Image (cartoon, coloured by chain):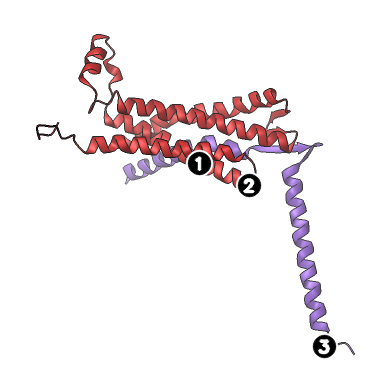
Amino acid sequence: MKSHLGNLGLFVVFLILLGLPFGSFGAGKIMVNKTSVLSEQSVRKTEQRALEENVEEVSEVSESSEGTTP
Amino acid sequence: MFSRILTKLVDEAILPAVVLVAVRIVSVIFFGNYFGFDVTLSRAGFVYESAEGFLVINSYSTLAMTCVIAIGLLYVLIKSYIFHDTHIHPRISAKLFSLRLSSFIQTSFEVYAQGAIWLPYSYLMLLASGAMWYLGLVFDWVFYVALALAFLGTYFLVLDVEKELKPEITLEGGEE
């Protein structure tokens, strides 16, 4: 049992060593005028998604209220 | 006790991992200066001043890492083709012994343990460069170079393993 755990630990260490150099790919930030471009992009995408959802909700409401107007 | 193969793999993986991380850091700083883009190393990682700079530096830095993996794979392939104890040429063997360089001759276990490190590195580089190319973070040729390296590395290493598994048939009909 102990040797199995030890081998599993060794295997995990091996995988970490394999992945270590590629971890550095994620450690990049693009800053333009001291603001991160990636974070700006993600904020813009979230806003756009929220806007689209709002539009969908409004269109659903308008469709459902079409028959009820006097 | 611990598995001998796993212990060997961990032992062999330390140096390539350290070298690749060092190459990544040095190459980002070097190409940043070379192409005239501002790159700073902070606690959050590398900070690039422009998206264009990020694309150029990331591409060339990834290429530098691919070149290091290519050198590692070439080293393993030279050892497996020329200095492999199962099929080393007698003339080379005699020369190495006369020069007291018999340590150059390596067993299958040593050769393939190193191959089992550098080849997965080339596959991981292929995956990483493919994902980054898809996201527009590197130029397309970086991915093609990584693809060529992974393909050639696999092809030549498989040929050597085949040579190892299948004994050569001599003209006299016997096996070597």
Residue for badge 1 = B126
Instruction: Specify whether B108 is left or right of B54.
Output: left
Q: Dot 1: few (<14), some (14–19), or many (≥20) neighbours within 10 Å?
A: many
Query: Looking at the picture, do discs 1 and 3 lie on one chain?
Result: no
Residue for badge 3 = A67
Q: Which chain is drawn using purple?
A: A
* Chain that bears disc 3: A
Residue A56 picture location, percent across and down: 77, 71
Residue B56 picture location, percent across and down: 66, 33
* Chain that bears disc 1: B
Residue B168 picture location, percent across and down: 18, 34
Residue at 29 percent of width and 18 percent of height: B103
Residue for badge 2 = B135
- Name the one closer to the observer, B57 or A50: B57
Instruction: Specify whether B171 is left or right of A43.
Output: left
Residue B15 picture location, percent across and down: 45, 27
CA gap, disc 1 to disc 2?
14 Å
